Amino acid sequence: MITRQLLLALATAPVAAFDYNLVGAGSVVLTDVSTSISPLQTLFVDQDVSVVADGLEWEANDNATTVTGTLFYETFVDGKLAAQGNMSLDDVGRELPSSVDAGTLSVSKGGRYTIEVVLKVDEQEEASTSAE
C-alpha cells in the first residue's frame, strides 16, 4: 500500500521550469518592426528592430537553485545596454521556451554593430549569444 501511495505522489508531483538550468543560447534574430522582415542582416539608421534570442538550451538541474523562476535578459549594442526585461517561467511547466523576445533597439548612425543578449535565470550562470 505504501508503494502505491508513493508512486501516486511521484506521478502528481509538480514540475517547474526551475528544475532546469539555462545552458546556452543559439543565435540572435533581428526583425524590422515596421515591415516584419526577418531575419535582418542590416540595421537601418533610426529604424526599430526587434531582438530575439533563439535556440535556448536547457539542462536538468539536480539542486533547484532558482528562487523566483524568472528569466532575465539584457540586450547590448557594442557593449552598451539597449534593452532589459524579464519573463516569468512559473506557468511553463516542462514547455521551456526555445526563444525569448529581448527588446527593441535602434542605431543612430551607420556602421558595423555587435548585438549581444545575456540571459540569466535567477542566480544561475549566464548564457549569452551575439551577432554582428
Image (cartoon, rainbow, N blue to C red):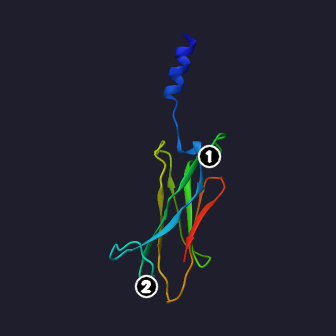
Place of residue 49 in the rendered image (x, y in percent of width and height, measured from the top left) = 43, 75
Place of residue 26 in the rendered image (x, y in percent of width and height, measured from the top left) = 53, 62
Distance of label 1 from label 2 (alpha carbons):
40 Å
* Viewer-closest of 51 and 74: 51
At mark 2, the secondary structure is loop
Q: Quadrant of residue 32?
A: bottom left
6 shown above or below 56: above
Q: Of all residues shown, which one is farthest toward the left?
A: 35
Q: Which residue is mark 1?
A: 67
At mark 1, the secondary structure is loop
Instruction: Please report the residue visible at 34 percent of the width from the left and 72 percent of the height from the top.
Output: 36
- Disc 2 residue crowd, few under 14, some 14–19, many 20+, Cα 10 Å: some
Q: The residue under label 1 is which amino acid type?
A: Val
Q: Which residue is mark 2?
A: 44
62 shown above or below 109: above
- Disc 1 residue crowd, few under 14, some 14–19, many 20+, Cα 10 Å: few
Instruction: Please report the residue visible at 50 percent of the width from the left and 49 percent of the height from the top.
Output: 89
* Viewer-closest of 93 and 86: 93
Place of residue 77 in the rendered image (x, y in percent of width and height, measured from the top left) = 56, 77
Q: The residue under label 2 is which amino acid type?
A: Phe
Q: Using residue 43 as the reference point, say whether residue 63 is left or right of it.
A: right
Q: Quadrant of the C terminus?
A: bottom right
Q: Earlier in the sequence, mark 1 or mark 2?
A: 2
Instruction: Please report the residue visible at 54 percent of the width from the left and 85 percent of the height from the top.
Output: 112
Place of residue 87 in the rendered image (x, y in percent of width and height, measured from the top left) = 50, 56
Q: Quadrant of residue 84?
A: bottom right
